[in-house]
Image (cartoon, helix red, strand yellow):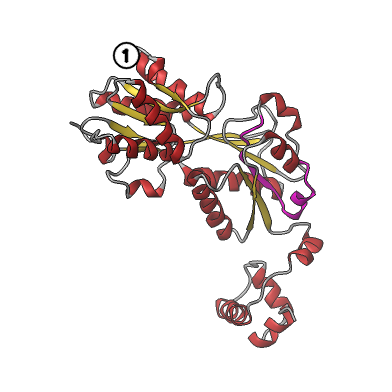
Amino acid sequence: MAVTLHDVARLAGVSFKTVSNVINSHPNVRPTTREKVETAISELGYRPNLTARSLRSGHTGAITLAVPQLRLPYFAELADSIISCADDLGLVVLIEQTGGLRERELELLASPRLRMSDGLIFSPLGMGQEDAELVKSPVPLVLLGERVFSTGSDHVVMQNVEGAQAATEHLLAQGRRRIAVVGAHENEEIGTAGLRLRGYREALRRHGVPYDDDLVAYMWMWHRANGAAAMHELLEKGVEFDAVFGFNDTLAQGAMRVLQDAGRRVPDDVAVIGFDDLDETRYTLPTLSTVDPGRGEIARTALKLLVDRINGTAAPGAQQVETKYRVVARESTAPR
């Protein structure tokens, strides 16, 4: 039999109403009473009945997070940050993976599963601006990333152009002039890869360094194996370079391993920098320089926007918030 509020009340020696007040974070509960109730909840293993809560309040206490792939470490760490922040607010997070495919993203937006939660934090990858009119959700929605502008939804974005420019300028400041890029997407302008390539080119322009397309390795997926494949391609072409900018940390890690296998010393021969500031970059050999795009700030901001929409306390009009970034210099770009 499932544990009920009445069971908790009996064990704690309080009324049903008092238990309800504790669970719903009512302020007028004495600390000693709250402690007794929380102890009883822990001992009995009580779990709230989300269906009953939904019927009473119209809210389920759950939100949905939709990301392309948890296999990509950035999205795994982003999900972890959002789950942690949501837990502080007493919210449960349901995870959906779209694979970054347009048809699956559209299917999600039309799915009745969304009604199991109070709101959606959505990171689209396959949809584009031409799909803006299709971005409609039956629950409050906050978008992450660069895709699908002008939808009328709240939007949290990282500064991809500025962050990539700062990463490139960090390499230029070390005297590197032949900076290879790993992870560009052909003919992309609005997506993450297109924006980071724009930042890279802007940094070169500002410092009077010619752009050379031979230094750009195009790779659609951004896993370690793709970074390794791109570096093999650059080495086989005989392209001369003294630095590598991986458009995410996993690409940079794959590229760095191939460089080391080829006898190129990092950073003596080739400096390497990534983007995302994944936890594992602190433990690579050498440790990987990177750009911290403000992942924690992204999680906190997206949740605040969503909760405000759920509670009806949001400011009028769609909000667009840019998070702060910083270059994190480590061993892979140490001065020669």
Q: Residue furthest front?
A: 236
Q: Is residue 130 left or right of residue 283?
A: right
Q: Is residue 236 left or right of residue 82?
A: left
Q: Which percent across, then down, holds residue 128?
A: 65, 27
Quarter occupied by residue 335? top left
| Magenta region includes residue 99 | no
| Magenta region includes residue 126 | yes
Please tell me whether residue 329 is drawn above or below residue 195 in the rendered image: below
Q: Residue at x 55, y 59 (%)?
A: 88
Depth order, front residue of 86/184:
184
Q: Residue at x 28, y 34 (%)?
A: 262
Q: Residue furthest left?
A: 336
Please tell me whether residue 271 is drawn above or below residue 309 in the rendered image: above
Magenta residues, as a range? Answer: 110-127
Q: Which percent across, then down, holds residue 309?
A: 69, 45
Please tell me whether residue 180 is drawn above or below residue 334 in the rendered image: above
Q: Which percent across, then down, holds residue 31?
A: 55, 76
